[in-house]
Amino acid sequence: AIRDMMRTLAVCHTVVPEGDLTDPSKIVYQAESPDEGALTAFAKAMGWFFCGKTSTHTTLKVHDKDEVFEVLNVNKFNSARKRMSVVCRTPEGRIVLYCKGADNVMLERLAPAQPAQQRMASQLGVYATEGLRTLVLAQRELSEEEWAAWNTVHHAASTAIDDREGALERAAEEVEKDMVVVGATAIEDK
């Protein structure tokens, strides 16, 4: 459970590491938002060091052991979607969608009847009334066949001449569903 949450924080982002990639103390994360940088830095502090990214792979050093994720697809964040996701082949060979986003859009995309879901939604409400920005973290394992079928849709959307952004959003909708919640965050607005 903790591993799934930390993997989501360490893999599902657009952060770029700069500095000495072999030394966590010398890494500076360049992030599109302060929250994304803070969450990636938190994962690093907890032993899930995001230390490298190429267009096809993300590398973590997890308690001094390298973990390489093959990045298969990225569904980018935008203000309408209020979430982002990545589909990766994990070091164990599984295909997993890692997703994070605003609680109001994520809760409706979770698989039904998860034991902690109601308790989490209630706690997120408490955090929101305290003025904290909340995110829900979730994942979904895909079979090779599910991913191959969806990847065809995603590829067609990414190469569409007309309404590419709309096509990519519709493709993301198809895969960002029936997810299992792995955690939530609440960050103070400073």
Image (spheres, rainbow, N blue to C red):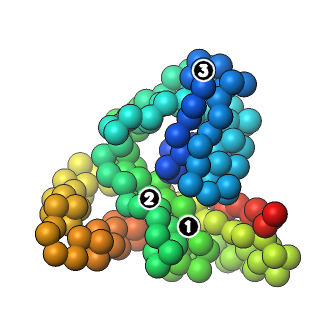
| Image quarter of the C terminus | bottom right
Identify the residue shown where x is 67% and y is 57%: 35
Q: Position of residue 106 (x, y in %)?
A: 53, 73
Horizontal side of residue 51 vs 80, given as left or right: right
Instruction: Check disc 2 and report its element: helix, strand or loop.
Output: strand
- Residue 50 image-quadrant placement: top right
For residue 174, say whether it is visible. Answer: no
Identify the residue shown where x is 47% and y is 65%: 77
Can you say whether 175 is above or below 25 in the image?
below
Horizontal side of residue 89 vs 110, given as left or right: left
Specify which label sits upstream in the sequence, 2 or 3: 3
Distance between the alpha carbons at the discs numbered 3 and 1: 30 Å
User: Callout 1: few (<14), some (14-19), or many (20+) C-alpha neighbours within 10 Å?
Assistant: many
Location of mark 1 (residue): 101
Identify the residue shown where x is 32% and y is 52%: 73
Instruction: Check disc 1 and report its element: helix, strand or loop.
Output: strand
User: Callout 3: few (<14), some (14-19), or many (20+) C-alpha neighbours within 10 Å?
Assistant: few
Q: Position of residue 94 (x, y in %)?
A: 36, 42
Location of mark 2 (residue): 85
Identify the residue shown where x is 63% and y is 44%: 40
Location of mark 3 (residue): 20
Specify which label sits upstream in the sequence, 2 or 1: 2
Q: Position of residue 121 (x, y in %)?
A: 69, 76
